[in-house]
Amino acid sequence: IKLNGAAAVSPSALKGEIFDVGSAETRSASGRRVVDRVAVKRRLTLRWAMLSAEQAQALIDGGADLLGVETMMGVNECIAAIEAIRSLSDIAVLCTLSVQSDGKCYFDGTVFEAAEVLQALGVDAIGVNCSTGPDQLESVVRALHEMTDLPIVAKPNAGMPKILETGEAVYSMQADTFAAHMGQLVEAGASLIGGCCGTTPEYIGALRGLKR
């Protein structure tokens, strides 16, 4: 059972926080509206924590054995989600971030910073998913493996997508190539592996010989 990061939260779910910035809005000397980005970010993080707790409670009540918090775009939303879950239960939790090839998050911080904080908060596994292909993540996975005793999760896309004129994302990395690169991630320290965007049952089947 998974909880997705802010990138997957519907705009309506955050409507009050995005458009009603309230006390975070001030006026400059010229009378122009000025928004305190730190205050807005704080309110968004609080809202994400509330959403995470609501979703987690429903899944726990439904009998989930494990929660997967994935496609997280920054350290702060990871902290908010894990703290919310841990306030409810000691259920097993995996947390994966969507990062660039150097480990930097798209919102704030790095996956390495996240690993340090989230281990202290009690996650059961840490890693990466989405954003890029397995060929771009070997150094990230190896660095994570060297800095933590937690199991490392790797669920990348089937390479980098090509965006067609229709807006459709097409992933060109084939299943055998994907599996070969995933083998390198296993050697680098990944122990929980899978696929994200562009992968199919064929891709997952190709991984079965790599790790059990």
Image (tube, rainbow, N blue to C red):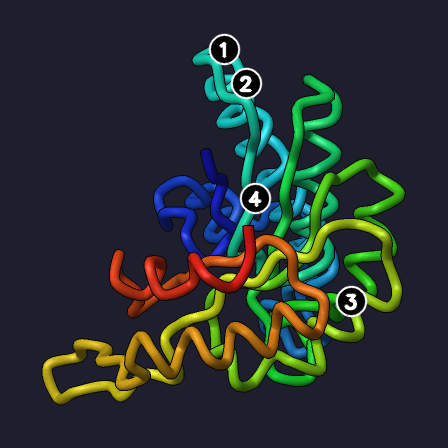
Mark pair 4, 1: CA separation = 17 Å
Mark pair 3, 2: CA separation = 29 Å
Mark pair 2, 4: CA separation = 14 Å
Specify the amino acid type for callout 3: Leu
Specify the amino acid type for callout 1: Asp
Question: Is residue 175 toward the left or the right of residue 78 in the image?
Answer: left
Indicate which disc, 3 or 4, sits on the residue closer to the N terminus. 4
Specify the amino acid type for callout 4: Val
Residue in view at x 59 percent, y 68 percent: 33
Mark 3 is surrounded, within 10 Å at the Cα level, by few (under 14), some (14 to 19) or many (20 or more) other residues, namely many
State if disc 1 and disc 2 touch (CB < 8 Å).
yes
Residue in view at x 60 percent, y 72 percent: 99
- Residue at label 1? 61
Residue in view at x 46 percent, y 52 percent: 19
Mark 1 is surrounded, within 10 Å at the Cα level, by few (under 14), some (14 to 19) or many (20 or more) other residues, namely few
State if disc 4 and disc 3 touch (CB < 8 Å).
no
Badge 4 marks a residue whose secondary structure is strand
Badge 2 marks a residue whose secondary structure is helix
Mark pair 2, 1: CA separation = 6 Å
| Circle on res. 144 | 3
Percent from the top left, x then y, of residue 10?
Answer: 36, 47
Badge 3 marks a residue whose secondary structure is helix
Mark 2 is surrounded, within 10 Å at the Cα level, by few (under 14), some (14 to 19) or many (20 or more) other residues, namely some
Percent from the top left, x then y, of residue 20?
Answer: 51, 47
Indicate which disc, 3 or 2, sits on the residue closer to the N terminus. 2
- Residue at label 2? 57
**On screen, residue 104 above or below 97:** below
- Residue at label 4? 69
